[in-house]
Image (cartoon, grey):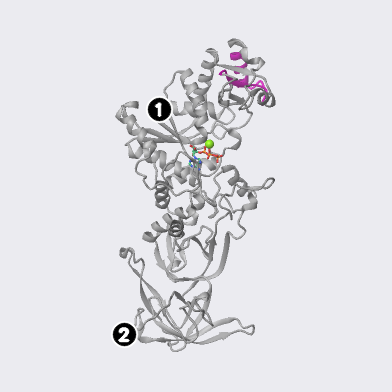
Amino acid sequence: MTTPDTDVASNFITKIIEEDMANNRYEGRVHTRFPPEPNGYLHIGHAKSICLNFGLAEQFDGIYNLRFDDTNPSKEEVEYVESIQDNIRWLGFDWEDRLYYASDYFEQLYEFALKLIKDGYAYVDSLSAEEMRAYRGTLTEPGKESPDRNRSVEENLDLFARMRAGEFKDGEYVLRAKIDMTAGNLNMRDPVMYRILHAEHHRTGDAWCIYPMYDFTHGQSDSIERITHSICTLEFADHRQLYDWFIEKLDIYAPQQIEFARLNLTYMLMSKRKLLRLVEEKHVSGWDDPRMPTLSGLRRRGYTPQSILDFAERVGVAKANSRIDIALLEHHVRQDLNKRASRVMVVLNPLKVVITNYPEDKVEYADAVNNQEDLSQGTRKVPFSKTLYVERDDFQEQPHKKFFRLSPGREVRLMHAYYITCNEVIKDEAGNVTELHCTYDPETWGGSSPDNRRIKGTLHWVSANHAIEAEVRLYDHLFKTENPNAVEEGQDFTVNLNPNSLAVLNQCKIEPSLAEAKLGDNVQFLRKGYFTLDKDSTSDKIVFNRTVSLRNTWTKVKKKR
Ligand code: ATP
Ligand code: MG
């Protein structure tokens, strides 16, 4: 785990761009892109990449593209294309009319391939996938040339045209770059450029039965779009040499690739393949399950775009892979919500309180400030009456030493309302406490007494007759280990799932103002955390998600270090 660098305004990438600007490289332009493969939902790691790519363009008065690198028809779906756009807009970025698809370049890429064949830089190979692997060699042994490597240009052109025309079955032939089977960089050992795949593509339908490989698509797509700085994650460093080779042999515009370290977070997984398994095997309710690291999940959980932008800026960019403490992300969520969220009173685990000396049918309305941090959010009226609910764990019959809340004979403050004293504890036959009988001091309305007597405990409460019942979902990390990928031999990452990541509370009592809550609203349940309405809510069932508790674990983490 690492503590991120707090010097975020400049980093090694901004230094490169500043230098390029100073040297008038790319005529002073900065043009970046975010290039997702539409084979899953975006996660917080992608958000980091979006903030970096788009943020840099904004910082240098440049522009940015959104481009789907959709070269793999079998795993791609329109659902993903839509969710990705929706999530990026939610983060607050606007690519205007610059939405592209690598599949728009299929014809151009085909032309590029023809040029390489004609120039003697590509050949059609009939080795099977297995043979090709065997011929490839290893890091310590050079590879072996395919018998097909020296086919004539005419023969290659003919076979490639027939591949496109659909004369062959999947896997019968591939088109390979003719580079160097002894290269130290394995990516340079005659990589495959095209394969035969009789599969329907989400955009081009059945127009093609050959598809370019990602490595023959990505760099040229950046070139076609005249991207200046192609920012990507470290695993592409070994591919840069190949991308540069294609660009050079094709003699086309050359972007500059810059690699940075992937974002990893404790207790979270960032592999789309594994996230897809969680969805398919129903370990979670879907891609937008509030425990998922996906933007759809975090959004449903109540995370704000601003908190994610702040976090992304705070972690900066690194050149070496590391794992960031998830407490830092939660810290930014709390910081943002503290300013934004109205405070309300909700009792999660209710215990009935009867104020014995309060008139039967009387209702008074307390003026409650919505947000101490932002008085412009105004006040609201909270009804108070004879029968209330308080939190069950705000009462102890035999209070331990540091417990200052309700117990027999003890006086506490009901927030925004009166001081009450507990006189009697009512129990059922099994000995469970079912209600408390208390008296109130009429001189203490508003939460203070004329004699300024000292009260240690302040409780939140809800008037029983006015309360609305709701379901509240509390979340813990989806995985119980800091690195969910780490498993013993023969085990699957799912062994690290936290069986207690979701707790559902069914009989919560929420104050009536929350009947008006809308999807996307953030509220603080006083003393309980930040919450947001869940999309499962219906006209007869209200459901809230806890976004994050109030306890700031990040400051604790920092102190420990
Ligand atoms: P997979 O999960 O299968 O590895 P991917 O993360 O490569 O997929 P892409 O759709 O190709 O998914 O990612 C789009 C962009 O987001 C790429 O430029 C990639 O480098 C970047 N990216 C992906 N994961 C992270 C991460 N954890 N941190 C930062 N950037 C990331
Ligand atoms: Mg990728």
The image quarter containing residue 357 is bottom left
Kindly identify the residue that appears in the image at 42 percent across and 24 percent down: 254
Quick one: SS at disc 2? loop
Image location (x, y in percent) of residue 152: 60, 10
Q: Start and end of the magenta stretch?
A: 156-179
Image location (x, y in percent) of residue 558: 44, 56
User: Label 1 crowding class (10 Å Cα cut-off): few <14, some 14-19, many 20+?
Assistant: some
Work out whether residue 347 or residue 198 is closer to the camera in this orientation and state it: 347
Q: Is residue 126 left or right of residue 316?
A: right
Q: Is residue 287 left or right of residue 345?
A: right
Image location (x, y in percent) of residue 488: 66, 48
**Residue assigned mark 2:** 450
Q: Do the residues labelled 1 and 2 touch (CB within 8 Å)?
A: no
Quick one: SS at disc 1? loop
Q: Single out the mark in the foreground, 1 or 2.
A: 2
Work out whether residue 514 or residue 174 is closer to the camera in this orientation and state it: 174
Image height of 425 relative to 514, above or below: below
Work out whether residue 231 or residue 92 is closer to the camera in this orientation and state it: 231
- The amino acid pointed to by label 1 is Arg
- The amino acid pointed to by label 2 is Pro
Image height of 421 relative to 532, above or below: below
> Is residue 160 one of those drawn in magenta?
yes
Residue 401 visible, this angle: yes
